[in-house]
Structure formats: C-alpha cells, structure tokens
Amino acid sequence: MHTPRIRWAAALAGAALLTAVSACGSSDSSGSSSGGSGEKVTLTYRLWDEQQKVGYEKVMAAFEKANPNIDVTVEMLPWDQYWTKLTADAVAGTAPDVFWMQTSYFPEFVTKGVLTDLSPLKLDTSKYHKTVVDAYTYQGKLYGVPKDWGIVGLLYNKDAFKKAGVEMPEKLTWAPDGSGTLLETARKLTVDEAGKHPDEPGFDADKVKQYGFGSWNHYQTQWMNWVESNGGKLVDKNFGHYTFNDDASVQALQFGVDLVNKYHVAPPAAQTNLPTGKMTEMFERGEVAMFPANNALLPFVAPEINFELGIAMMPEGPKGRSVNLNGLSEAVYAKTEHPAEANKLAAFLGSPEAQKIMADGGYVFPALVEFGQNYVDYWKNSKKLDVSPFLEESKGTTYGMPVVTGFPGYESKLVQIFNEMYLGRITPKQAADQAVQEGNASIG
C-alpha cells in the first residue's frame, strides 16, 4: 500500500483550518470535564480500515464491560485522509487518545514526542512477533503495543496451472542469472495469442494473453523482497541510512526488471507502473498467473475472482527466503488527558482476549504469536482457503519496512525513480544510486 506525503510544517500552517473530530476524550458524555474518582471517561480510538472496525467494535465492547468507567469512541478515517488528519491533530494538540501506528510513519511521530513510552506497561514482548516489536522500539523503549502483522505471499491461479498442465513446485527459487524454478514456471504459464511461450520461436511479446508472473514497481511485495533474499539490505539499521545500492541489491533489482523486459513473463511497466493498480486487476481477470501480495489484500481480491485461488510461499533467493512482514501497533498520544485510561486500553488491545477476537474473525494475523493459527482456521473454515503459507513464512526470515525518518515524504520520489527503472530508461544501478542518495538526503 502506498502512502501520501507527510509535511509537519504544512500541517502546522493548516491546522487552524481543520476541525478536530474528537476532543481527545477530554470530556464525558455530558460535556463536563472528567477526572474525578468514579467519573466516566471517554477515549477516542482512531483506525483506517472499515472491515477491521467491525472487529474492533467487539473488542471495545469487551473492554468497556471490563472497565465500566471508560467509554471508547471508535473513529474511522480512510487511509488517504488518516495521516494528514493525524498529523494536523498532533500539531494542534488534539490527537485521539489511542490510534493505529504504521512502521513508515513511526519515526516521524516518535522523534517529535507525539507518542507515549509504553515500557511501563511491562508487556512480555517475547510473546509478540519480533519484527513488529523491533519496528516500534526507539532508544530501547517500546512506543507501540504490537497489534498485528501482514506478510507477502504468492497468490496464484490454480485454474491457469491446471490448464497449462503445470504443477506448483514444492519450492520456488530464483537467482539473478535467471536460474531456478520461478522463471521456469513463469515461462510455462506465459502464453501469447498464438499459444506460444517466451522460450519458443515466434513468441510475440506484444500480444501476450496470459503472463506467468506479476513483477512491477511495488516495493513492499516486489523488489524489496528480491534485495533481501539476495543478501542486500534496505537500511543499515533502524533509524539509520539506506544501503540498497550495493552489488547484491542491484543484482536483485536487475532480476525484477528482467522478468519484465528480458524474459517477458510479466506485463510491461507502461501498463503496471504506479500510480495504477492494474497488476491487481490483471490478476483478478486471470491475465497474470502468479501475484505476490500481502495477506491483507485477500478480503479485496478473493470476492473479485472467478477461478480457484492458491497461496504459496514466496520464492527463495540465493540467500534463502526473506519476506516483508509489516506490522501495526497501538499508539498512545503523549498529550492525552487520560493517560491511565489510554494506557489501560492500549494494554488490553495487546492482550490475548482482544487479539484472539481479531484472529478468530479473520481480520488480521495478531501480533501475539500464539493466535496465528486462529486466523488460518478462520480462512479455512469460512472461506475454504488455505492461508497457512503466510503463517509458515512468518516463522522464517522476515524484515520490516525501513524505519527511518522522512520515508513518507521520500516515497513518491522513490516510486518515480523506480518507475523509470522498470521502463528500462535507467539501469538498476543508476536507479539504486539515485534512490539511496535521495533517501538519505530526506532523513531528518
């Protein structure tokens, strides 16, 4: 998922023009200030996912039952409004008491003192997925209760495999030189209008009916995974600097581009480059056989397809399989007028009771490791879909999104540079050097 730019200075200038949706739980239902013993406290909880909101209403009902002196108002804002509004509210001092935090935005908020240090909650962080915990740790302190995680896996069209007489390999593999089972399989599933495959004489790359693989400029599900699985590193450390212009990273980028421009097993970038969402649509229409995607996309993709959907683990590179795992956390506003109650809510959201509700409903993989199977069971029993490869991947090598300041503002430039790379207008080395230079210049 791609994100809008974040500009704290602009938010400061425009904050007066925005009306805060909530008063940060600063008053009770009668409008009077709450704070005396036994008085009702109202907290505002903000999220951006309408489907998850249904699950969280059940969670909040359980919390309010256990805490009758606290009411929680759940506030939903669409993703494209969420960060602009949250930034403006933080600048104005009117942010919600508890809210969702995403890895890419975490550095901006934590370094500006917007988030509460939640170390006093004394959570047993060993029970949560380590990649999520690490993403919300700053200077040795935890600033977000681990909420959930999503991971990249390989969606594939079982009908297309059957029609081509192709079996999904037990393990997909790739290497920068094109060896491995991924490219081999993708060639068998790529067919032009005359029925020819890319390795056959007469194949017409301009008239492809079905592509074997979806390779495109989408960092979370695509080239970042190639980089990490080839031994490259996106950043040297959390709150550090970008490093993905080394030899291993550039080789990995070249492979992703070669799938499009050299091997012709993926659609041309002119069709799929951002900001379009055409790759997802092509998969839904059956025009792409294998499609790397985060499990969070399932509720949106599954209803749109008319073929049997399969899920496999991501391909292994020369250094094994390293997959993006992007987790969210529950953040507490540093200036909440009800810190004790807000902290109590945050702690509850990280509890087994709350995370089991969200897992049992198939909303998310919970950050608490013990309930991952609950999410798998929901999809198996309710949707007849085996999502266990996602869970299996989470037990292996995973990495998070870059935890560095400035990423939201840098992201659009990164996408622009890599659009040119996928189009073949600049080399992967040129793209990586330029992107790393621009990225490191954006670090505050």
Image (cartoon, rainbow, N blue to C red):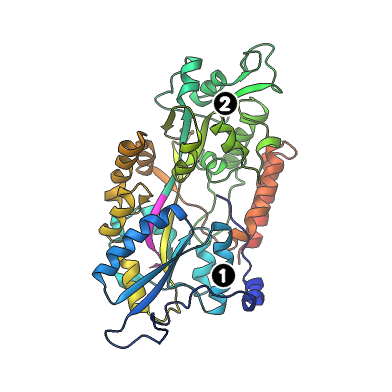
Q: Is 156 within the magenta? A: no
- In the image: residue 78, left or right of residue 441: left
The correct choice, above or below, for 126 with respect to 320 in the image is: below
Q: Nearer the viewer, residue 126 or 375?
A: 375
Which quadrant would residue 227 be assigned to in this image? Answer: top right
Residues rendered magenta in the picture:
140-149
Q: Position of residue 389 (x, y in %)?
A: 37, 36
Q: Helix, strand, or loop for circle 2?
A: loop
Q: Which numbered dot is residue 87?
A: 1
Q: Is 146 within the magenta? A: yes
Gap in angstroms between the C-alphas marked 2 and 1: 45 Å
Residue 410 in sight from this viewpoint: yes
Give, as a three-letter code, the residue at label 2: Gly
Q: Nearer the viewer, residue 421 or 32?
A: 32
Badge 2: how crowded within 10 Å, few (<14), some, or many (20+)? some
Residue at image position (44%, 73%) is 333
Q: Position of residue 224 (x, y in %)?
A: 54, 44
The correct choice, above or below, for 311 with respect to 350 in the image is: above
Q: Position of residue 342 (x, y in %)?
A: 36, 74
Q: Which numbered dot is residue 178?
A: 2
- In the image: residue 406, left or right of residue 37: right
Residue at the farthest top position: 201
Of callouts 2 and 1, which one flags the residue occurring earlier in the amino acid sequence?
1
Q: Nearer the viewer, residue 305 or 214?
A: 305
Residue 123 in sight from this viewpoint: no
Residue at the farthest front position: 30
Front position among marks 2 and 1: 1
Secondary structure character of the magenta stretch overall: strand
Give, as a three-letter code, the residue at label 1: Thr
- In the image: residue 120, left or right of residue 333: left
Residue at image position (62%, 46%) is 245
